[in-house]
Amino acid sequence: MAEVGLCSWFALLIVKPDWIDFAPRLASDNCELTSNATEDYNCLAFAAGVTNQWWEPYVIPPSRPGIYWPAGVFPDNGVEHWVAALATVGFRPCTDASLDEAYVKVAVYGCDGDATHAARQLKDGRWASKLGLLEDIIHATAQDVAGGDYGEVAVVLARPRTEDDP
């Protein structure tokens, strides 16, 4: 049997048999689990710094408590619409995913123009992701969750860091 990274192995055994298709680059040496699975928020909300809402473009008005989409942003999963949603909390396009201690950066991933995932950079340069309905993880680089079903980094955004940002 081929070696499978800790994050991938945990998800394969416990959560979803095809999880490795999401992010095949994750391995035990580049990620760590940081939370239990929850439906309280998703990757887009988590990247925006929100952990009490699920940001969903197709649910207007929300059909269940906790689902949110920013007013004035077209409800669609296109990368440009996720960028517009993140702009409502101060994020703007930037040039790259390198660490700049003055800014929080978010990577938006996509396939064929559709956004598939978002990850947030931490103060130490590592990245944090919420894996859909699954757990939160910390991974070494933005590229660690690229590939597979998540596609590649489509755009990187930044906003000034506050003292409350992780």
Image (spheres, rainbow, N blue to C red):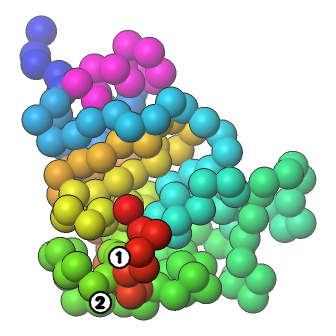
Asked whether residue 2 is drawn in magenta, I would say no
Image quarter for residue 96? bottom left
- Residue 115 locus on image (x, y percent): 47, 66
Residue occupying image coordinates x 38% and y 62%: 166
Task: Check the image and report above or below for 133 versus 96.
Answer: above
Q: Residue at x 34, y 34 (%)?
A: 33
**As rendered, which of 30 and 103 lies closer to the eye?**
103
1 or 2: tag closer to the N-terminus: 2
| Residue pointed to by mark 2 | 94
Residue at (22% x, 57% y) in the render: 126
Cα distance between the residues tagged 1 and 2: 11 Å
| Residue 119 vertical placement versus 71 (above, below) | above
- Nearer mark to the viewer, of 1 and 2: 1
Q: Is residue 101 left or right of residue 66?
A: left
Crowding at mark 2 (Cα within 10 Å: few <14, some 14-19, many 20+): few
Q: Residue furthest top?
A: 1
Q: Tell me the SS state at disc 1.
A: strand
Residue 12 in view here: yes
Residue 10 horizontal/vertical position (percent): 34, 20
Q: Main secondary structure of the magenta part?
A: helix
Label drawn at residue 104: 1
Residue at x 39%, y 51% (from the top left corner): 129
Which amino acid type corresponds to the residue marked 2 in the rendered image?
A: Cys
Regarding mark 2 in the picture, which secondary structure is present there? Answer: loop
User: Which residue type does callout 1 highlight?
Assistant: Val
- Nearer the observer, 21 or 141: 141
Q: Which residues are magenta?
A: 6-17
